[in-house]
Each structure stands twice: as structure tokens, then as C-alpha cells.
Image: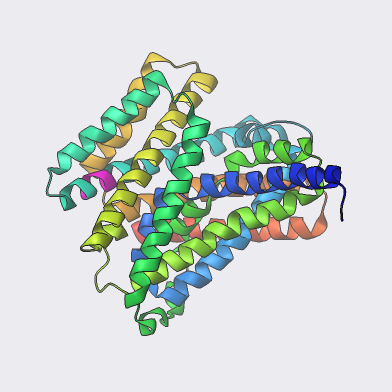
Amino acid sequence: MKPKFGRKAELVTFLPFWEAIFIIVGTVIGAGILGLPSVFAKNGYLTATAALLVSLVLVIELAFMIVELEGSSSRQIPSLIGYYLGGMARAVAFLGFLIAVFSALTAYYIGLADSFRSLGLPPGLGYLTGIIMSFYVCYRGLKGAARAELIITIVMIGLIFLIILFSSTNVNVEKLNEFHLPNLASPFGIIIFALYGHMILPEVKRLLISAGLRKKISLAIILGYSIPAMIYLLFSASIVGSLESIPDVATLAFHGYLYVLGISFALLALSTSLMGNALVVRDTLWEDFRIKEEGILIAPFIPLMLATLGGKNFVTMLDIGGIFGICLISIMIALSYLRGGRKIYRKISATACILIFLYLILRKIYLMI
């Protein structure tokens, strides 16, 4: 029998380890999951699965690069890039950030409008709800956000598993056997968007180091990103295999009690993601550009204008954010590692990341011309 203090020591190290994993999972899983099933259905489930697995490897490798480059500092990603590559590179990374976050906010406005439409309400009411939430968090912030985020994450994951459980009874496995090699590159944008959560890594690293768990940082990163990936696969399989037609906001296609679960999850995911991203824009404008009153107006109104005037649809905007925003940031992270990293094999993976993300950006530009 182990002594009591041994059990306490195990508990002291056990809890921070799983807390770190939960922080990554809670950061990664958001409204992006709503657009995955339509992309899986359009390109073939196995095709999108292959793209997701490749994206998972890329995202984890980038996370390792960030943790190594950060060292003992507490720099955020743009500052980290600026430290290794200079001010111009930091500006490029910030441009990628703006593209990603404004594309996301635009998508969330569109998603709210689609959700309100499915309830038989005017889509404009969805836009109005979004603008009110954005203004609120930009003006007042989110007090008690850490505790609320924990509760919301638990509720969201619970709703996801209820949707998977109840919809999986009608899954047609034959719908999950489609593989189309020419479509392999198509799902990457939204998948990378849905897997991205690198901004939280400095906090995760500090948590584990303070608990004496430096050697478990890599395992926490692998599990923290792999768990959302597995949830995405199960969620998409349950919807692609059970529904004939899948809209951009996938859970709006359900009927009966599943529709109640689906619309509840959609509204919760869209609302929390919208408020979180609006707050990020406000804080960034305040801290980096010393913009205050203007920032309160910019955060809600630019994406609202894009949503009502130029935004195509929910999935398209997330895809744009993933390709032109997150891929651009990821290229700068990989270039930073080539400059400041020490591990040869990771420099090889950094080079591969640059080539893959550059290809995805150029391919998207070609398709848009």
C-alpha cells in the first residue's frame, strides 16, 4: 500500500496534466465543428478524414515548434515571430490573425442568421443578436470568463456526444466509404481552422512547468489536439451517415428531439465563439494599437458588413479564415523555427509545413481567380 503523501503527490501532478489537456480541448472545439460534416459529405468522408489526419500532424508539429521557440519567455505568437524574423514578419503574422478572426466573426454572424431562419425567425434577428453580444463583450469584457468557459465547454462536449449517440443509430456505413483523391486538398481550410488553438500554448506550458511536469508537455499537446480530432471524426460520421442533405451549419438539418439538441448546440457554439473572437479583436486593438473607442466599433461592424454584403456562407468564410489566415500564421511560425530552432528533424517538418501551407494558399488563390 502506498503512503498517503504519495497519493497526494500523484493527485497534484495528475490534475494539472489533465487540466492542461482540457484547456487545449476547450480552446480548439468551437463553432468550426458545425461546418465539418458538410465538407466531409461534399468531398467524401474518407477523403476528409485523410485531410484531417494530415492537418492534425501539422498542427501538433507547429505546437511543438512554438513551445520550443518560446523557451523560458512568455511571448505570444506574433511577438515570438517578431523576435526571430523581425517587425515585417510580425506584421505579416498580424495580417494573418486579422484575416482569420474577421473571417470567423463573419461566419458566426452568418451561422446565427441561418440558425434563426431555421427557427422561423427573421435572419436579421440573428445579425442583431450577434451585434448585441459583440458590443457587450467589447464594452464590458467577460467577467468570470474562466469559470464560465469551463462550464460551457463541458455542456458543449455533452451536447456533441448526445448528438453522436442519438444520430448514430441511423448511420448508413456505405456513405462513409467515399474517397476522392482529387478532392484531398479541398477540406484543409476549415479543418485547420477547426483544429487551431495555438494561442493557448504558452499558458499550458506555464501550467505544466509550475506543476513539475515539463516532460509531459509533448504528451499533453498530442492528447489535447487528438481528442478534438477524434470528436470531429465521430461527429461528422454520425451526421454524414445519417442525413441525405447537410447544410453549412450541419445540426440545423435534424428533426424532432435531435433538432432541439442540434439548434441548442449551434446557438451555444456560435454565440460563445462570436463573443470570444470579438473580445480577442478588442484586446488586440487596445494592446497593440492603443485603439479604444474605435476598437469597440470595429470589432462588431466590420464582420457584420462582410456578412450582410460580401459573406458567401458559413463554411466558405471559415475556409477563407483557415487558408489565408491560419496558414499564413503557420508559415511564419515554421520560418521562425528554421531561424531559431535546434532540432534537425523538426526543421525538416517545418520546411514541409511551409510547402504544404504555401500550396494551399496558392491553390485557393488560383480557384478564386
Residue 87 placement, left or right of 95: right
Which image quadrant is residue 77 in?
top right
Which of the pair 168/352 is nearer the observer?
168
Residue at image point 52% right, 46% down = 26
Q: Is residue 335 above or below residue 364?
A: above
Residue at image point 63% right, 33% down = 76
Q: Is residue 284 above or below residue 243?
A: above
Which image quadrant is residue 5 in?
top right
* Coordinates of residue 156 in the picture (x, y in percent): 42, 49
Which of the pair 366/309 is nearer the observer?
309
Residue 319 placement, left or right of 16: left
Q: Is residue 34 above or below residue 205?
A: below
Q: Does any portion of residue 339 appear in the rendered image? A: no
Which of the pair 217/145 is nearer the observer?
145
* Coordinates of residue 183 in the picture (x, y in percent): 42, 73
* Residue extending farthest bottom: 174
Magenta stretch bounds: 110-114
